[in-house]
Image (cartoon, grey):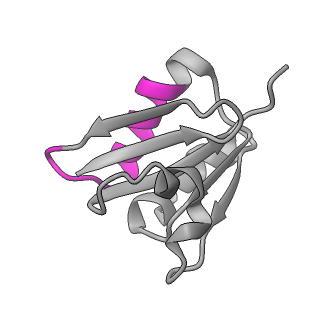
Amino acid sequence: MALNMVCHGTGLQIVIPMWDGYDSSKVTQVLKKHWVQHYGWPEMVIHDQGTEFMGHVFQDAMAAQGILTVPIDSQSPWQNGKPRELEAPSNYNYGTWTRNAT
């Protein structure tokens, strides 16, 4: 399993293996360590409806930063956009980040 993060603005993709499983807390930690630390907080996160994204730890962390979270329809993985276009393996968790280039 892995967390696949893609910036819609730049096309930057980061895939982080999550060998010991994932939950809302772990996904939040991975986002902070591998994305926020280097690129700052995104303005919007588009994600599937998995508990790792819908869980209160992830949602609370996004709300605390004023980040809009947009869950895709449960039977419409193509709505996640770039991660699917990049043909990442189906056992990846998908989150896409959007940040204005300023």
**Residue 57 visible to an observer of this rendering:** no
Can you give x and y, in whole percent of width and height, for residue 27 in the image?
Answer: 39, 45
Q: Residue at x 14, y 46 (%)?
A: 20
> Furthest-left residue in view?
20
Image quadrant occupied by the C terminus = top right
Q: Residue at x 46, y 62 (%)?
A: 55
Side of 87 relative to 13 (left or right) = left
Relative placement, left or right, of 23 versus 55 is: left
Where is 45 relative to 16, above or below?
below
Residue 98 falls in which quadrant of the image? top right
| Residue at far top of view | 38
The residue that appears at 62% across and 46% down in the rendered structure is: 62
Q: Position of residue 38 (x, y in %)?
A: 53, 16
Q: Is 63 positioned to the left or the right of 29 in the image?
A: right
From the viewer's perspective, is residue 4 above or below residue 85?
above
Please report the residue visible at 20 percent of the width from the left and 52 percent of the height from the top: 21
Magenta region, residue range: 19-35
Which one is nearer the viewer's eye here, 96 or 64? 96
In the image, residue 16 lies in the stretch drawn in magenta: no
